[in-house]
């Protein structure tokens, strides 16, 4: 967010900036989503409060998505519509844990995980990962971390784009069942994969807590609409928490999300653009001297080692923005201990923008 704000100030002064810092699609919400909401407004629908768990039609539509995408039969009663995935994490952590309990996270990882856990007085246990495990945790590391009350995984992951195979997901789930830890799976980048489809944790563990969102694949970041799938025994707890903390998700966004579920052709067109952008960056960055690049199996990020150029990623990022006209995110956001030698590049923009970003990176480094 600081890089975004610095970029905004430069743009206000007339500079042209290529945005590779933010995890936000460069595409708008699908036409089917906006058309559905417009129709509701034109009819004069009141768009007031909904039930805390979300519109029944939307919960059924999300359950149908699991049948289409994964071949799973999912009870819509286990689906909870949320005000974005961030709301889902808050509800999951409050429902699953008590203050002072410990939750393991892979580093590098999405910074909001540790910040939300810390705000709820939960103990964050860092699992240092590397290229050898695809920047994903493995059971042996969890054993070494000591007693744990929960494990949060992300596949595809932010900032690395790496994914857990079905077998790896199964092994982590089995570890949680064996030790009594709660298994939480962040799946907000599902749909955005480039070679192998992502595995949902529900395939290997029906008791997992799954968090997803319309933000990334459906290009609806600002609409703040997401969902959870939770065990049957947790639904009432989540409902009570959601009603007291948030009342309900935005009715307007829920209507739009119903339309987004019918926009496969448009959304697959977006994914095709990201795939082309990914290919260009995966070829160009090593040629420039960036090292230890994660494979970017999914999402729209590339996480790269910059130690050939700098051991201060914050300073390097600031200089790249100021002198090169490219905004990228310091690895310190994702790994506060080792992130001083890494950057995250987002390729969620248009192909023309990514091509220009590559040209500017080459000029900057030369």
Image (cartoon, rainbow, N blue to C red):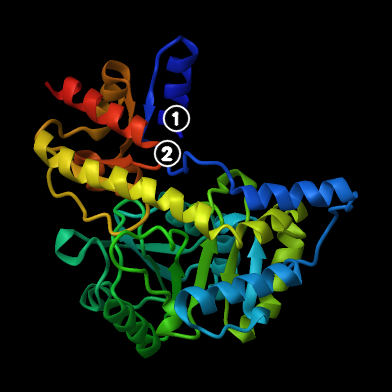
Note whether 361 is above or below 289 in the view shown: above
Note whether 82 is above or below 224 in the view shown: below
Residue 256 appears in view: yes
Note whether 339 is above or below 177 in the view shown: above
- Which residue in the structure is indicated by mark 1? 4
The quarter of the rendered structure image containing the C terminus is top left
- Quick check: marks 2 and 1 in contact, CB under 8 Å? yes
Residue 336 appears in view: no
User: Which of the two discs, 2 and 1, labels the residue nearer the N terminus?
Assistant: 1
State which quadrant residue 89 falls in: bottom right
Residue 283 position, x and y percent, is: 16, 43
Q: Mark 2 to mark 1: distance in Å?
A: 7 Å
Q: Nearer the viewer, residue 294 or 353?
A: 353
Query: Of helix, strand and loop, which one carries label 2?
Result: loop
Residue 263 position, x and y percent, is: 57, 57
* Count of numbered tags: 2
- Which residue in the structure is indicated by mark 2? 22
């Amino acid at each position: 967010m600081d890089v975004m704000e610095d970029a905004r100030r430069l743009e206000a002064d007339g500079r042209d900036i290529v945005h590779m810092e933010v995890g936000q699609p460069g595409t708008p919400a699908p036409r089917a989503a906006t058309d559905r909401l417009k129709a509701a407004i034109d009819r004069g629908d009141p768009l007031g409060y909904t039930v805390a768990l979300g519109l029944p039609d939307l919960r059924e539509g999300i359950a149908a998505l699991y049948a289409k995408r994964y071949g799973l039969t999912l009870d819509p009663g286990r689906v909870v519509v949320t005000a974005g995935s961030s709301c889902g994490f808050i509800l999951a952590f409050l429902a699953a844990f008590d203050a002072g309990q410990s939750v393991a996270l892979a580093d590098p990882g999405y910074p909001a995980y540790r910040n939300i856990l810390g705000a709820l007085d939960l103990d964050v246990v860092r699992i240092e990962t590397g290229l050898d495990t695809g920047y994903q945790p493995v059971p042996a590391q969890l054993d070494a971390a000591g007693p744990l009350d929960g494990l949060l995984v992300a596949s595809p992951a932010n900032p690395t784009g790496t994914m857990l195979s079905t077998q790896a997901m199964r092994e982590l789930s089995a570890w949680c069942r064996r030790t009594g830890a709660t298994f939480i799976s962040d799946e907000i980048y599902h749909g955005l994969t480039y070679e192998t489809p992502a595995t949902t944790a529900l395939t290997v563990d029906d008791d997992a807590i799954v968090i997803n969102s319309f933000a990334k694949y459906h290009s609806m970041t600002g609409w703040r609409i997401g969902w959870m799938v939770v065990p049957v025994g947790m639904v009432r707890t989540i409902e009570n928490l959601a009603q007291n903390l948030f009342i309900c998700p935005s009715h307007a966004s829920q209507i739009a999300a119903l339309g987004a579920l019918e926009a496969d052709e448009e959304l697959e067109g977006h994914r095709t653009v990201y795939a082309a952008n990914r290919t260009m960056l995966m070829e160009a960055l090593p040629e420039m001297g960036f090292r230890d690049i994660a494979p970017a199996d999914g999402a729209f990020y590339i996480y790269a080692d910059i130690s050939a150029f700098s051991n201060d990623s914050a300073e390097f990022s600031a200089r790249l923005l100021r002198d090169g006209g490219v905004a990228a995110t310091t690895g310190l956001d994702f790994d506060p201990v080792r992130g001083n030698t890494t950057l995250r590049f987002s390729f969620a923009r248009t192909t023309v923008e990514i091509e220009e970003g590559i040209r500017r990176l080459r000029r900057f480094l030369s």
